[in-house]
Image (spheres, grey):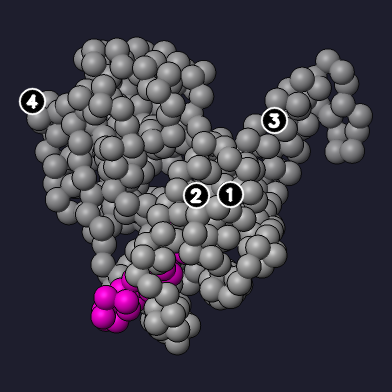
Amino acid sequence: MDAEALADRVVPESSGTLPWGAVWGQSDAVQALRAAASDPADLTHAWLITGPPGSGRSTLAYAFAAALIAEPGDEPAMRQVLAGTHPDLTALRTEGVIISIKDARALVERSYFSPSLGRYRVIVMEDADRMAERTSNVLLKALEEPPERTVWVLCAPSDADLLPTIRSRVRTLRLRDPEVEDVARLIVERTGVDAGIAERSARHAQRHIGMAQRLATDAAARERRDETLRAVLGVRGVNGAVEVAGRIVQVATDDAKALTAERDDAERSGLLRTLGIPEGGAVPPAVRAQLNALEEEQKRRATRSLRDGIDRVLTDLQSLFRDVLMLQFGRDDELINRELDAELRQVASAWPVERTLVVVDRIAETRRNLEQNVAPTLALESMLVTVASGRTP
């Protein structure tokens, strides 16, 4: 699980709040899931929790799982579920670009096991939107006819991210988008940062709680974001597009390495200890396959982290040119990037609305292309040429 996800996953300190204490700002959803967990007549055996990034989809999914698995009042069992270590919880959060058929089949196989200790077996799939069609088809029968005491909980940004055949087999619960002021207040409570920094971070993160917390507590991340947006606004031709695209990819690569390097080293050291190999010792050929498998998994995770980092940059760029559009239509009361007011107004007055719309569409298309494993540098170069010229290459 990456740093942003961990920021949104907090096991409640107070026993009186279990298992819902870490769920923030989603009272209607909590009420619906509480009722389902306490009344078998209201319990559907397959759920889809949707909401914008940072709205707490996975936090709510694990709270629901704890309420289903543990007996009411069994706080140790609830904490075990919330920590992801209970034997009746099976969870998948892919650290690759997509969820593999192999992983989906493993989930389906686990779904047919009876609960070993708890009331239900719960299968949580945090990134259900990352399934290809063939992978989705693996889940269909299990979702349609699960065992009596198995509950599936899928999470995705939107129900439109899943196939209609999946949507028809689940009960959808849509989370609300929190307000900037609410996210800022939460960040102050969690971290103690200055209220002004918290508000700015919540606004720049577009109310994504995990990203807002990272921006609020990492001055370097705030500075990188500001530099990237200014660099994109300054692109004037093909050479500039190539230079800025390379810079964005390099920053995202460095960020991904920083997030994964410590974990990678710990995993490698742990595997070597398990195999009885001293640090720095030669790896026997008989166990090299296990080490190679770990390295391949880490490479997939690094690719996912890099693409997620670039996607965050593209999300920031969407907010930038959304602000330009707002100004072009005479609205300046809800700008996301208020700190760039002068630069935004300059672009808004220099460009026709049609050009801004072309750029906004091109950024959205680039995000979709990156999901299909297009080379990040080439995709960004092409997009930035559109920013510089107002025309799609």
Q: Residues within 10 Å of mark 3 (few under 14, many from 20)?
A: few
Residue under label 2, please give it. Answer: 366
For the stretch drawn in magenta, what is the main secondary structure? Answer: helix
Extreme residue in the bottom direction: 342
322 and 263: which one is in front? 322
Residue at 36% across / 13% down in the picture? 113
Marks 4 and 3, Cα distance to the nearest angstrom? 45 Å
Cα gap from disc 3 to disc 2, whole angstroms = 27 Å
**Quadrant in the picture for residue 359:** bottom left
Q: As shown in the figure, which amino acid type bears the numbered disc 4? A: Ala
- Left or right of 215? Residue 268 is right
Front position among marks 3 and 1: 1
- Give whichever of 348, 217 is nearer the camera: 348
Which residue, given by chain and number where applicable, does mark 4 sit on?
41
Camera-nearest label, 1 or 4: 1
Is 180 a magenta residue? no
Neighbours of disc 4 within 10 Å: few (<14), some (14-19), many (20+): few
Q: Secondary structure at mark 2?
A: helix
Q: Can you tell which quarter of the image residue 231 is in? A: bottom right
Which badge, 1 or 2, is on the more N-terminal residue?
2
Asked if marks 3 and 2 touch (Cβ < 8 Å), the reply is no
Question: Image height check: is 302 above or below 6?
Answer: above
Numbered badge on residue 50: none
Query: Between marks 1 and 2, how big is the CA–CA gap?
Result: 6 Å
Residue that carries the numbered disc 1 in the rendered image? 379
Q: Quadrant of residue 148?
A: top left
Q: Earlier in the sequence, mark 3 or mark 1?
A: 3
Residue identifier under label 3 = 296
Give yes or no for contact between labels 1 and 2 (Cβ–Cβ under 8 Å): yes
Question: Real-space Cα distance between discs 3 and 1?
Answer: 25 Å
The span picked out in magenta is: 313-335
